[in-house]
Image: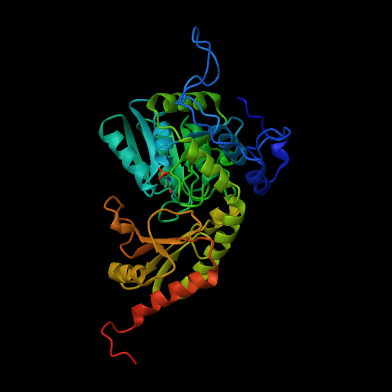
Amino acid sequence: MTHQPASHPEHLRPDTLVVAAGRPPRVHDAPVNPPIMLSSTYVGTGTVVDGDRAYGRYSNPTWDPLEEALSQLEGATLPALIFGSGLAAASAALSLIPTGGTLVMPIHSYQGALVMAQEQAAKGLFTLRTVDIANNDEVIAALTGAGEKAADMLWLESPTNPMLEVADMELLCRSAQAVGAIIVTDNTFSTPLVQKPLELGSDIVLHSVTKYLAGHSDVILGALATSRPDLREALLHHRSIHGAIAGPFEAWLALRGLRTLALRVERSQASALELARRLDTHSGVEKVLFPGLESDPGHVRAKAQMSGFGSVLCIQVAGGAEAATAVVEALDLWTPATSLGGVESLIERRRRHANEPDTVPQNLLRLSVGIENVEDLWADLDQALDQLSQPISGAGL
Ligand SMILES: *Cc1c(COP(=O)(O)O)cnc(C)c1O
């Protein structure tokens, strides 16, 4: 690798690391930021296979600083691997399950990852056991196999999408280790600033870099981080051979976005908590799902294993699916769109997606809180919810 790591990254706090990690060596007149390198191939001898890079599908110098920064943030001892999308990273991770093996996965996993696992299971590549990830007994039974084969992989996502259930990460990782299963944690919702899956016992951390890490809703990118050389080698091989690589511009944009991650997360988390509290007492809201609320079933676990509660919250609107749709339509500042983790606040009714499990309520709205002023976000939600209680046909006042 031509890129020198920052001098003592382990001594730096995470909110410093997002700024300091992945910088070019300090050489006179060198750029402060790593440049974008556009090359599909690299000069070698042409007579023997030599050099570290060889070809653009195997490596690109623009990937290195981002992979270094993500690895340092997650506390991995090896450079992370970036992929063309979060699902490309998920595909590489699922490839580690031996043929005929067993995968245990939350029923409320990110939809794309769940569909991928379901389709691969339907082809007979492996057996899929979906679980309520907040229910320890159920997950442990699925891991040990209760008379059947034990699991080969445990997929963790906590908090889950979109139900925001919180898994008992350390306990489940120990249980998975005991049966020899590889543990993959999708840490997209939390970011490494809020939750450190490798420290909690996970083997691999997965990110949709698309979301908080890049942070500006203008990039699709994924990443995996691990400290296990055997797993990293297999994942790197998968990336090189299956070809789901990142474009250099996307990698560059993601590192640029990462520089402000700590500020963005701090702001959006504080706003999410404030909005959750206010929504919790609003007459137009049946229920708020957010582990930051003391009344939330995941609160105690979240407090124990996360340094915050994230910036995604869900509400169930009083009056069912129609009322939930009316709220989305009445909003002005909040953008109706899927995805999360950008600077702008987004909202969507999840059951509009055909693949969403029917355990997700019809009246559930998922809110990704951005970095706007919380009072403007609240005013918009409040007026939209208040319209529900107005008579539809308007005599007006
Ligand atoms: C968006 C998302 C993914 C998929 O990432 P893409 O970058 O869209 O491929 C995976 N997991 C979670 C939790 C996500 O939010």
Along the viewing direction, whichever of 34 and 310 lies nearer the viewer: 34
41 left or right of 200 in image: left
78 left or right of 327 in image: right
| Residue visible at 63% across and 45% down in the picture | 18
The image shows residue 211 at horizontal and vertical percentages of: 47, 49
Vertical side of 340 occupied by 362: above or below: below
Along the viewing direction, whichever of 53 and 161 lies nearer the viewer: 53
Q: How many marks?
A: 0
| Residue visible at 39% across and 79% down in the picture | 386
59 left or right of 104 in image: right
Vertical side of 304 occupied by 251: above or below: above
The image shows residue 168 at horizontal and vertical percentages of: 51, 48
Vertical side of 167 occupied by 68: above or below: above
| Residue extending farthest top | 47
Along the viewing direction, whichever of 99 and 356 lies nearer the viewer: 356
- Toward which corner of the image does residue 119 lie, by quadrant? top left
The image shows residue 222 at horizontal and vertical percentages of: 46, 40
Q: How is the image coloured?
A: rainbow
The quarter of the rendered structure image containing the N terminus is top right
Quadrant position of ligand 1: top left
- Toward which corner of the image does residue 200 lie, by quadrant? top right
Q: Can residue 151 be seen here?
A: no
Along the viewing direction, whichever of 212 and 128 lies nearer the viewer: 212
| Residue visible at 45% across and 55% down in the picture | 164
The image shows residue 374 at horizontal and vertical percentages of: 54, 69
Vertical side of 6 occupied by 341: above or below: below
| Residue visible at 49% across and 69% down in the picture | 377
